[in-house]
């Protein structure tokens, strides 16, 4: 049985296999076909952080696969009353076939997975957001940007940055990360991904000047600078991230046919300009839709692995 907690645990071949399944299911959906790969199965969705795309994509995906999804927030479960993760994990595992968790702490997620007896999927933690990267790379493939791409990530060294670093390290492409001083990626993740990159042929470099990172890039991506729980730091972050907005001038430094990605929600005028977000190089809504398709591929793949074991 496999969990999906971070891309660190997956090989290049496995990541591409999951996406191939996602493409296969997406193609069938376009023809109005809904093969019941997960017929009568139940996905428990545990949310300690609110969400639009994560809930919609998993709930819709499970329905389209012939199963059922149950939404549980902290207010709807005993987690909100202090029940230990390990107890919730063992109870939910007895009643559901798969679990998706969106929580604040990677440690809590890993504790849950340790005690769970069904596959557990990371819907987002403080450290990683791997399901988003499946959708991002699916979008890159669809737009012809998966053949030895140069990807520039501009912004905070957060869970999206870490996930991009692992994707690059596993798949062997070039990633340039630009963050202001003091907002760099986690040192342990840097060490681990740079070590992995030596095996795959990936090139991961870090900058404080976003213009250097974006120069000649095939893909430009960013994320909000002010995530949930950081609202009190907003004014300081606005000052610290001055010059890090992905606007028309910055996009002009990338290749003329470069695409722009953003995991959303986007805050226009902060990390990205309105003109870039709504412009012809932006593929953010293809990317958002691909959360549905990539995650369906992931759930079917995890179920297949469990049955084979």
Image (cartoon, rainbow, N blue to C red):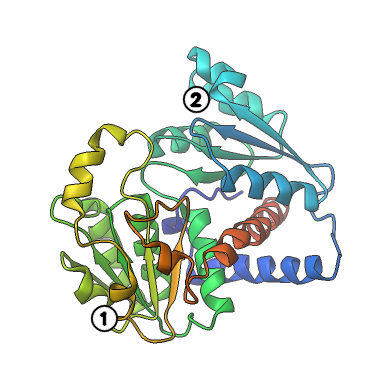
- Residues 62 and 200: in front is 62
Residue 127 % position (x, y): 36, 46
**Residue visible at 72% across and 48% down in the picture:** 60
Residue 189 % position (x, y): 28, 54
- Residues 153 and 84: in front is 153
Is 171 on the left-hand or right-hand side of 59? left
Is 143 on the left-hand or right-hand side of 31? left
CB under 8 Å between discs 1 and 2:
no
Q: Secondary structure at mark 2?
A: helix
Which residue matches tag 1? 215
Question: Which numbered tag is attached to residue 191?
Answer: none
- Whichever of labels 1 and 2 marks the residue nearer the N terminus, that label is 2
- With respect to residue 14, does 6 lie above or below? above
- With respect to residue 161, does 248 lie above or below? below
Residue 13 % position (x, y): 54, 72
**Residue visible at 43% across and 71% down in the picture:** 260
Q: CA distance from mark 1 to mark 2?
A: 45 Å
Which residue matches tag 2? 85
């Amino acid at each position: 049985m496999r969990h999906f907690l971070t891309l660190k645990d997956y090989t290049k071949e496995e990541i591409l296999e999951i996406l191939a399944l996602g493409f296969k299911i997406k193609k069938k959906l376009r023809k109005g076909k809904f093969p019941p790969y997960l017929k009568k199965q139940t996905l428990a969705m545990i949310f300690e952080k609110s969400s639009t795309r994560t809930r919609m994509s998993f709930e819709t995906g499970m329905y389209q696969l012939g199963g059922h999804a149950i939404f549980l927030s902290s207010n709807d479960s005993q987690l909100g009353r202090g029940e230990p993760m390990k107890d919730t994990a063992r109870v939910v595992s007895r009643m559901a076939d798969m679990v998706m968790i969106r929580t604040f702490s990677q440690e809590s997620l890993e504790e849950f997975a340790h005690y769970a007896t069904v596959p557990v999927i990371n819907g987002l933690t403080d450290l990683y957001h791997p399901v988003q990267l499946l959708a991002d790379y699916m979008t890159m493939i669809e737009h012809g940007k998966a053949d030895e791409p140069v990807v520039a990530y501009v912004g905070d060294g957060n869970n999206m940055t870490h996930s991009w670093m692992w994707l690059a390290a596993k798949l062997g492409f070039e990633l340039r990360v630009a963050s202001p001083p003091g907002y760099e990626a986690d040192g342990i993740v840097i060490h681990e991904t740079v070590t992995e990159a030596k095996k795959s042929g990936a090139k991961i470099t870090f900058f404080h000047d976003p213009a250097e990172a974006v120069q000649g890039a095939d893909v430009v991506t960013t994320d909000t600078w002010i995530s949930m729980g950081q609202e009190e730091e907003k004014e300081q972050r606005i000052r610290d991230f001055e010059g890090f907005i992905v606007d028309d001038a910055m996009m002009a430094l990338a290749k003329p046919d470069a695409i722009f990605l953003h995991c959303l929600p986007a805050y226009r005028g902060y990390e990205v300009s309105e003109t870039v977000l709504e412009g012809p190089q932006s593929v953010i809504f293809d990317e958002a839709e691909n959360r549905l398709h990539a995650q369906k591929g992931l759930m079917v793949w995890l179920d297949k692995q469990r049955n084979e074991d």
